[in-house]
Image (cartoon, grey):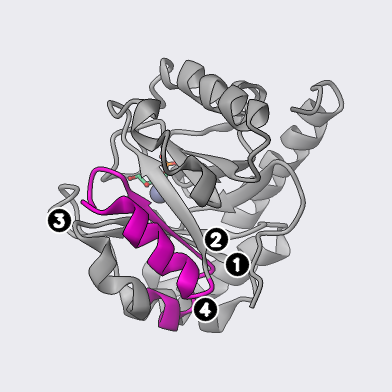
Amino acid sequence: MTVSFGHRRPMLSPSILNADFACLGSIVQDLERAGADALHLDVMDGRFVPNISFGIPIVSAVKRSTRLPLDVHLMIVEPERYLDAFAEAGATALTVHVEATVHLHRTVSAIKELGLLAGVALNPATPLAAIEEILPFVDLVLVMTVNPGFGGQTLIPAMLAKIARLRRTIDEARLPCLLSVDGGVKLSNLEAVVRAGADIVVTGSALFEDDASPGERLREFRQRLAAIGEHASPH
Ligand code: DX5
Ligand code: ZN
């Protein structure tokens, strides 16, 4: 089985973390109609991060509501214990934190053996050197631009340089891996994130902070990306 996120660059992967979970099915469908490329699902265990969000039943409920790829971000310790369960629930990609698993190569290999895309995520304080050896084996790298645990935080500006450095490393080595950016992305900083080199832009609270539907907000992101694309050179 070959899985992929499709070919559009950059892609938009909305996070439902700040959604009203009583209306999850209709929100997911609204985001799909608005042109989401994937859905970003933030799983938190109250140990790796100070917050608890949701787990396997919500991932499978989202899977039943949409045909979009599911971009599952595991903010949990020892994620290797749950890979089968998230695969069974319908994940397309499983992203684990390099800080949360001791045998990262084994964990990445196990994700790929399940037929899924394998991602690694880096906290803001974790240097890019931590993924130097694993980079050729992964399908995506998720650069956290906030400390994980909560939606609605402010993007740490110093992370833009980290994204740009990773972009250069990926391009120079001609690696196929996607560069995803997660945390505090708003319309106001979208251009900076894309110009730094993001292939996948995750956005959460910006879609849920007022009365507009998340789909309407996502369309604004899509329009802004189109406007940026007319001026940006491809990376
Ligand atoms: C933070 C999560 C993010 C978050 C994004 O721990 O990993 O995916 O939901 O939400 P915003 O865009 O509000 O930072
Ligand atoms: Zn996330």
The residue carrying mark 1 is: 69
Mark 2 or mark 1: which comes first in sequence?
2
Q: Decide: marks 3, 1 in contact (CB < 8 A)?
A: no
Amino acid type, callout 3: Gly
Q: Decide: marks 2, 1 in contact (CB < 8 A)?
A: yes
Q: Residue 130: x, y in percent?
A: 33, 33
CA gap, disc 2 to disc 1?
A: 6 Å
Q: Is residue 235 magenta?
A: no
The residue carrying mark 2 is: 39
**Residue most toward the right?**
230
Amino acid type, callout 2: Leu
Mark 2 or mark 4: which comes first in sequence?
2
Q: Is residue 201 visible?
A: yes
The kind of secondary structure element at disc 3 is: loop
The residue carrying mark 3 is: 46
Magenta region: which residues? 86-115
- Mark 3 lies within 8 Å of ligand 1 (Cβ measured): no
Q: Residue 114: x, y in percent?
A: 47, 75
Mark 2 or mark 3: which comes first in sequence?
2
Q: Residue 1: x, y in percent?
A: 64, 78
Q: Mark 4, residues whose alpha carbon is within 10 Å: few (<14), some, or many (≥20)?
A: many
CA gap, disc 1 to disc 4?
A: 9 Å
The residue carrying mark 4 is: 63
